[in-house]
Amino acid sequence: MNKKYIFPENFWWGSATSGPQSEGTFNKRHKSVFDYWYEVEPEAFFDKVGPEITSNFYNSYKEDLAMLKEIGLNSFRTSIQWTRLIKDLETGEPDEDGVRFYNDVIDETIKNGMIPVMNLHHFDLPVELYNKYGGWTSKHVVELFVKFAETAFKLFGDRVKYWTTFNEPMVVVEGQYLYEFHYPKLVDGEKAVQAMYNINLASAKAIKRFRELGCTEDGGKIGIVLNLTPAYPRSNNKDDLYASKVADTIFNYSFLDPAVKGEFPSLLINLLKEDNILWESTEEELQIIKDNTIDFLGVNYYQPRRVKAKESEIDNTKGWMPEKYFDYYDMPGKRMNPYRGWEIYPEAMYDIAINIRDNYNNIPWYISENGMGVEGEEKYIGEDGSIQDDYRIEFLEEHLQYLHKGIEEGSNCFGYHSWTPIDCWSWCNAYKNRYGYIAVDLATQKKTIKKSGTWIKEVSSNNGF
Ligand code: BG6
């Protein structure tokens, strides 16, 4: 008989999206860096599809949330857009329509029996704050983020009990300051490192405010969502091992350590000092980071990182870059998702679970994103008119099996959210790769449950498979 995978009681079976990727820009007060980038360079986006319409959640959230209930989800993460909720970015004064909208979304989520998880930053810095202050390299922007967070806590903290400060902050550092895939597309190691520090500080300061406001008194919890991409070395040779240790430190532990332990990894500090590129910090700020660690962790996992010892010449033309310490390793025979170009390696779910158990105080955590983006899913439409995405079901089951093994061995994981409930807009890839349990026809906005939507309903009602 096949093994059954039954998960802990009250396990979260949910799914995640974000404000900028689902709502559309209707009635927003400000433009985010992505709204602006699309305006000035639409050809940078797949099929020139921008963030204005997306899956129309701003208008259809009632029907959409009812569909999420229909496929059995018990929890749902989205993000509050800074550019929608806040009227005055300097004072944090809210916008009336933004307040109405997020109030409705939260109430409707609860009404449909789902736990709302609200995130505060999903790559969507107001572009004005970049133009005026330089964005995340500015400590004033850190203060403005805390004001925005405070407004959100005060408005919605009575009903929202799970908050996260940032989604994948390392991707902001990489996209905006190193690898040119988020506006303003800079290649500037010094700014990257300062932004890395400032975002850690912004998260800790928001957590501090959350606690000062008494949001924890009736069960409120706050965390952060990190994309953990475990770095696997080519071999156990010491230079390969060192390469993977440095890659993990720069890309994963630079946020994970301060979030959970209140301190930056000493290896990171030493490297940045040696490279003469360490951020500007004060004792007082470091104390805030130390004192304001998270209650729970969200982990986004899609793909591993394969590295080897540095063999190629260091490219100094771009200034400081993490690749000074390792080369990427193109492992022969790896399984790939050809559409997204990402390796498929479900075993990492187990490795992440055990790493958190053994090295991060076995903090309560959940998978906050995992999923498979596939292009051209129309070709899988079956006779009943729904997409037969068996490949997705297989992908999710394999990942869940490894997660289950980690939980069986004591890792404190309380849930699993896929990316994403309803096909949504994906940054520069726009609607190229679809991830949802529910398909959206962009021309008509008609939404149809895929086979994986029926599958998750079963899984959720059986608390396993
Ligand atoms: C995560 C993000 O990186 O992966 C999401 O939090 C994103 O915003 C998702 O959409 C899937 O990646 P992509 O680039 O295929 O959309």
Image: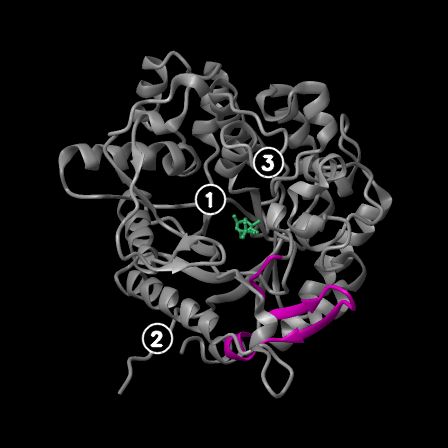
Which residue is more in the foreground, 342 or 292? 342
Where residue 25 sits: x, y (%)? Answer: 78, 47
Check disc 1: other Cα within 10 Å, few if <14, some if 14-19, many if 20+.
Answer: many
Q: Which callout, 3 or 2, points at the residue further toward the start of the chain? A: 2
Residue 442 highlighted magenta (yes or no):
yes
> As displayed, is residue 337 above or below residue 387?
above
Q: Measured along the vertical axis of the image, is residue 112 above or below residue 99? A: below
Marks 3 and 1 sit apart, C-alpha to C-alpha, by 17 Å
If you read the primary sequence from the N terminus, does the residue marked by circle 1 or circle 2 appear first? 2
Q: Amino acid at mark 1?
A: Leu
- Residue 226, label in figure: 1
Q: Is residue 55 left or right of residue 406?
A: right
Give the secondary structure at mark 3: loop
Q: Which residue is mark 2?
A: 5
Q: Decide if residue 437 is in sight here.
A: no
| Location of residue 45 (image quadrant) | top right
The magenta segment is 432-456
x and y percentages locating residue 334 in the rendered image: 30, 56
Comparing 214 with 15, the one in front is 15
The residue closer to the viewer here, 389 or 375, is 375
